Image (tube, helix red, strand yellow):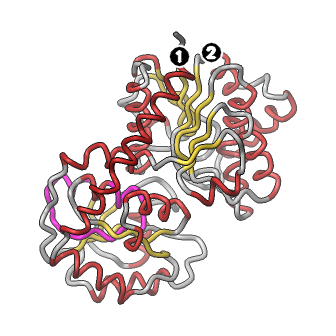
Amino acid sequence: MYLILHAFSRRNAGDGLLVDLTLEALEAAGVARSECALLALDPESFPDFGTVFRAPGEPSARVSWKLFQAGLNLGVDLVSGGTVGSVPALVRRSKGLIAVGGGYLVADSLVRQAGVLLNHMTQLSSASRSDVPTVYLPQSIGPLDGIAGRMARNHLAGMDRVFVRDDKTMAELNLPNTRRIGDLAVLKLARQIEEISPVDPQDQTILVGRDLPNPDMYLENLDQLAERLEAPRWAVQADTRGPRSDKAFYERRGYKDAEPFGTLLEAGVPGVVVSVRLHGAIAALLAGRPAIHLSYERKGWGAYEDLGIAEYVHDARSFDVDRVLQQVKALQADPAEFWERIRSAAPSSKEQYQEMVTEMRSLLVPE
């Protein structure tokens, strides 16, 4: 059994996509899907996955019995040195450990330090202590503050390979086992770029928003952007339980008639997409819609730099509404140059993907 670590929930389309792309990379490396098991915070959301185990933690970011159990798991793990508990037992049964990509190892506040400790530390410690190969797929990691941050960095140093998806993470970790590479969805886009048929955006716009901690000017600017665009359509990417739900955020803000983002794309709805969620932006690109990204973390800049369209990413908390409106109108009028820049950047990402798959094969699949 190959165990895939740190999965979250398919109720968030971006997290579900990363699990799918992890399986694709494993298959390319010679690991069959039937050999893979998933360790997820929300296992019920993966009914399509053959073998799924519940990871310690609370997917809804709320106080609950699951959170209390995660605390007990962490305590047992620390006291036993990783020899007791459900996660160490699964790790001992595994032939290899593969962590999904993402940005879940961030400890820049007390709340997020607690999230790393309770939702991810047991998996991290078990992987670092394991004798089997360990590969962490493209991550944005950090800042790693406090005890949680120090523990996470120490465990990451024990992995065979940690792929990181932005330069800031690479510099902050400064570990010999790290390698800079693109986000899994960016690498997918690069491999499919010649198959993508750009959709005429016409005069429409699709907005993908989300709640943000420490929002600064984000809410005011998002309201202003929506008011100045002509009849934008709101789209829900993450309809999870609790405060992470985009749908709940829209209801609190009074944004009406929000629809599932995937449904809009599958229905062929045209438009320039402005997305606060990175994988919402990349999903739009994969579906042939030009996308502007309002990024709230370092991962957005790394992804759009790798795509060759760095000027189309903006700080979500302080973006210039006029500048974003200008870009929307320019893309509606003629997105040809936008797509050409992505095509020009694709060969480098394709090469990175092949190198990643080759290294995964050498680590995970015995001769």
Q: Is residue 274 magenta?
A: yes
Q: Which mark is residue 1?
A: 1
**What element does badge 1 sit on?**
loop
Closest to the observer, 77 or 18:
18
- Quarter of the rendering containing residue 93: top right
Q: Is residue 249 magenta?
A: no
Question: Where does the magenta region start and end?
Answer: 260-282
Residue position marked by numbered label 2 in the rendering: 93
Question: Dots 1 and 2: beta carbons under 8 Å?
Answer: yes
Q: Residue at x 40, y 81 (%)?
A: 222
- Quarter of the rendering containing residue 238: bottom left
- Left or right, residue 342 beside residue 4: left
Identify the amino acid type marked 1: Met
Q: Residue at x 74, y 46 (%)?
A: 153
- Left or right, residue 112 beside residue 325: right
Q: CA distance from mark 1 to mark 2?
A: 7 Å
